[in-house]
Image (spheres, rainbow, N blue to C red):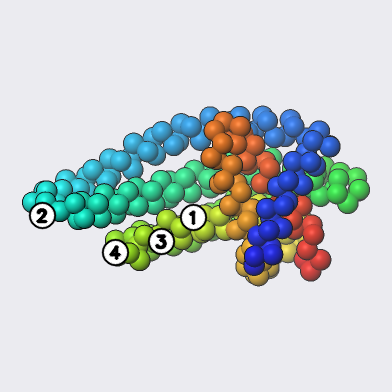
Amino acid sequence: MLKEIIIAFQSYAKAHRFIRKHKLWKWIIIPGLLYMILFIISMFFFGKTATGVVHYLISTTGLSTWVERMNSGWISFLFIFLFGILWLLMMLFYFSLFKYIWLIIGSPLFAYLSEKTECIMKGTAFPFSFKQLMKDILRGVKLALRNTLWQTVYTIAIILLSFIPLIGWAAPILSLFIECYYYGFSMLDYSCERQKLSATQSIRFIGNHKGLAIGNGFIFYLMHLVPFLGWVLAPSYAVVAATISLHQQKNI
């Protein structure tokens, strides 16, 4: 898996060179700006909602009063740390929902960009097919809904895990890995569909190449640490990088 994660990381550098060489910036910048605007608005409201939920839990459970009565610096630290982890998990969950909405909205562009990338790499013509594009979009939407369901189940389990002392501290890391896997999964599936893999076959294939999905999703999230520019470039770069990384697999 580590080798595949490294391949996925390297594919982002290759994607950057590929986009520059073939002048694909219009397919990167325009949807990227839309994504950035939606991301800023969503994160603002998600942050307020997560903070409100945490405050509600603290006030209704009476934990803050109990912590004050205990008058222990160590207990206060654990209390703050626990609810900090809960807030982070909620933000990851909210971002997950936003991510899937964006995948559904952006599926026409992602399908088109992935196919265009592969055609350029193979040196073949790029015959646009509206029928094929609609099939790609429909498949992308179905898989996004399927992944939303499974990731929600995993996230709820991780949130419950976060309440367990010490063990729960690893909850945000587990949640992040799941986030990375499912986002990378969606990016890789566009190529799997063009190789005539059914949804079931695609799930099995990507499940056997988890490193490619995790690596792709991880860099996607890492790019969000670069304000504005990273938010603009992240979505379409992920598509191109996923197509390049999967193109290197000989057994698809």
Q: Are marks 2 and 3 in contact (CB under 8 Å)?
A: no
Residue named by callout 3: 170
The answer to whether residue 174 is seen in the rendering is yes
- Measured as percent of width and height from the top left, residue 170 is found at 41, 61
- The residue positioned 35% from the left and 52% from the top of the image is 85
**Amino acid type, residue under disc 4 in the picture:** Pro
The answer to whether residue 60 is seen in the rendering is no
Q: Where is 124 relative to 198, above or below?
A: above
- The residue positioned 19% from the left and 51% from the top of the image is 73
Query: Residue 4 has which mark?
Result: none
Label 1 vs label 3: CA separation? 10 Å
Q: Where is 178 relative to 129, above or below?
A: below
Residue named by callout 2: 70
User: Which of the marked residues, 4 or 2, is nearer the chain's N terminus?
Assistant: 2
- The residue positioned 36% from the left and 60% from the top of the image is 169
Is the N terminus in the top left, top right, bottom left or bottom right quadrant? bottom right
In the structure shown, which secondary structural element does the residue marked by tag 2 occupy? helix
Q: Where is 178 relative to 220, above or below?
A: below
Frontmost of labels 2 and 1 is 2
